[in-house]
Each structure stands twice: as C-alpha cells, then as structure tokens.
Amino acid sequence: MSRQIVHISLTARDTPARLSEQPPVVFEATQSETPAITIDPRKRFQKMEGFGGAFTESAAVTWQKLPAEKQAEVMRAYFDPHHGLGYTMGRTHINSCDFALGNYAHDEVAGDFALQHFSIERDRAAILPMLKEALRLSGVLKLFASPWSPPAWMKTNKQMNGGGRLLPECRDVWARYYCRYIREYEKEGIPFWGLTVQNEPEASQSWDSCLYSAEEERDFVRDYLGPILQKEGLGHLNLMIWDHNRDAIYERASVVYDDPQAAQYVWGAAFHWYMGDHFDNLTALHEAFPDKRLLFSEGCQEDGPHTGEWGVGERYGRSLINDLNRWTVAWVDWNLLLDEGGGPNHAGNYCSAPILVDTQAGLPLYQSSFYYLGHFSRYIRPGAERILYASTTDELETTAFLNPDGIIAVVVMNRTEQAIPFALQYHDQAARTISPPHSIMTLRFVNFSG
C-alpha cells in the first residue's frame, strides 16, 4: 500500500492560522502509541445536505452598508465553493423576525382571506438582492423559510409580538400564505427547498412570535399546511416541525410523527441550540423515527456582538461536532452578518454573527465562529456520509465524513490549554501530527479502502 498524504487546514488561537494550510503529513505503516483517532469508512451513517446561514433583513441591510467591493468579498467568503466556506444552504423569514428593522407582514389588510393585498415588495429592498447574489455564487442554494408570526389580524392577541396563537378561522388562509410567499419568490428566480412550520413555537417573546402546542402544530400540518402544499404543487418542499431547542425535540416531534396522517407531510425536525445542550435527544429521536431527518436551523452567541471572543468559535465547533455525530444532516447558522452592535434588532435582542461589520469604516470583521464553521462547510460537502471514528482521548473532539469525491475529512477540535500530539489511524497506517491549544483542524486524505 503506497504512502498517502494527509492535508491539514488549521485555525488556532494566539496564532495567525485561520483556515490555513499546514505542511502535510503522511500515513506510515505503523501502529501508534500516542493518542489515536481511528477512522473506518466501512461504517457509514447519515448523508449531509449542507451548511449555511440566515438571510435576515438585518443581515441584508448590514451587507448593503458595505462598499461594493466589500459586499462582493463577504459573499465570496461565504458562498464561493473554492475560496470561501462553500455554503449551499440558507434560511430566511416569512414576515418579520426580531432581526428586522420592525414588525411587518406581507399582507397587513385585516380580513383579506383572498390575499389580494399580499406583497413581497419590502423584501426587494435588501433580502432579495442578497439572496440572488448568493445563488449566483454558490450555484445551488437549498433555501428554507420560517415564520416568526402570522400577520396580527390572524392572531388571538392581535399583534405580531408577545406570543399569541393562530386563530382557528385563519388556519386555511395562513397555510395558503406560505404557498403565496413561495410562489412570489419563485417569480424572482429564488426557489425554495423547504419550510418550517413556526420558529420557536413554545416561546412567547417580546418580538415576533406565535405559540403552538404539539397537538396544534400536528393538526395544522395534517389538516391545513400539508394538504394545501400538495394541492398547490408544493408538496416537494421539505417541511420541518419544531424549529426550537433540543430539550423538548423528542416530546414535540413524536406527537407529530405518531400520527401517520400528519407525519406523511413532514421531512424532519429543525432545532436550535439555546437552553442547554441535550445532544442525546437527537439520537433518541433518530432511533425512534429513523426515516425522519434532523436539521440545525439556528444558533448564535446571545447578549451582544462578542467581537473577537475565541470562545464563540469553540461553542460553534462543539455544537457542530456533537450535532453531526448524532444524525444531523444540515447545519444552518443564524444571521450571516450583523453590525458592530450585534444588530439591527427591533427588539434590542443583540447577538453575534460570524461576520460583524464596522459600518463606520465599511469593513467586515471575521470572527472565530466564521473560521470554525469553515472547517466543516468547506470540507464536508453535500452528499458526504458520516463515517465511524474511535478515539483514545477525550480531549480531542472529532467527527469524520467521506465525501462523494472520495476525500475523507476528519475534523479535530482541541479546547484545552495544551498541545496534544495524536495519530490519525487508518487501517494499519498512522499519520502523526499535533493539535495546538484552542484549535480546530480538518485533515483530508483519499479513501483508498474502496
């Protein structure tokens, strides 16, 4: 067996390395005595759909504040498949969310059950231009949309903020509203890949929000949204339930999945990372319903921009590794970019983003989370299959994938203060390297085991 080269990309704290290529190492016919990560591509798990981020109104408006050359730089950084992160997925919002300049709906005329006044005119100002540029660069963009709230006139509390519920008499028009939104975007050359039923249906927030019990979500999907999507020729869209935290994903999803008439319309469950880890709930849901998918649909560092904080990137890395190792097939970040204050946000719910923008200087500021995300999205491509790994150390966090082109990508993260030597074990060969403190690396090599 010929010696194989292992290419290494590295990001490390207190060094210049940011998705930087390192000197390659080679596999040698020896067993390792150092900590080892063993890879076995014969055992395969889920197939990846892709990685991406969210096209909010706030992200799009912030993007437009950059000079033209910096706008192009940011879009290449995210969507160029060769020199950027290679994003192939995206999320956007139906009506406003907190990361918008204010509350708005696409039809604010009370009682317009025929949707005669429906319009996406507001989105033409910022969201649509950003989406079109991303689609041009990536070639493929699996885009899904999530509502934070129906229009105020469709809700029990008569406002978009503060929770409230969908009025029973508005379930039909609300289901048709999703379809109209999709069709209007298609007219703009923006096709959709999927939908979520409702963003965070258990959260009554001071911003755009709407509450559904598990049974209400099930019944809405079964009796209205699912059938109407089919009737309107949109049954191909990947419909996702829950779209909230991992903590209650099993309880919520099982209510829908246990009803075959509702489950037939549902592709999978989307989830967020707030309110604790609860990673094993993903495995529990997959094992109970293996034909349904898991998609990470939102996560960010809350309470401000956290400019320059390395721990934000490590939070991303930890979530990515644990989610992917528990059957997640796509990982979609929250805002693609925000301003230096972590906004704009009409509710003052400021957060971080992988790219923050100094709007005074017109400069994008790349955060640690940008580079940590890139160690996955750049090297684990759509169609990649997760493969088995085993490790002799708990200090290195790992996941491994086999890409459609035969390249194996192994992501190794070190959140300790120590440099950790280790060997990548593959059959009877080992490639030795060192994981620096507070670093993440992606090792790539050709699968020669067939």
Image (spheres, grey):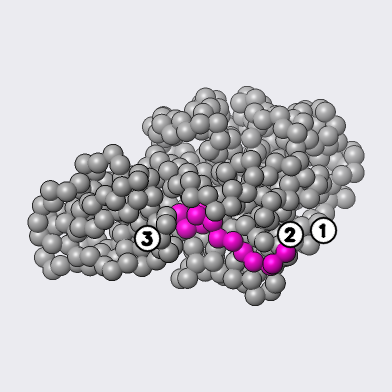
Q: Amino acid at mark 2?
A: Val
Q: Neighbour class for label 2 at 10 Å: few (<14), some, many (≥20)?
A: many
Q: Does residue 214 appear left or right of residue 316 in this picture?
A: right
**Which disc number belongs to residue 61?**
2
Q: Secondary structure at mark 3?
A: strand
> Residue 34, position in %: x, y?
17, 48
Residue at (59%, 58%) from the top-left corner? 355
> Residue 17, position in %: x, y?
41, 63
> Residue 365, position in %: x, y?
59, 61
> Residue 109, position in %: x, y?
90, 44
Stretch in magenta? 360-372
Residue identified by numbered label 3: 10
Residue identified by numbered label 1: 121
Give the mark, 3 or 2, whose residue is nearer the N terminus. 3
Quarter-wise, where is residue 69 in the image? bottom right
Q: Does residue 66 appear left or right of residue 153 in this picture?
A: left
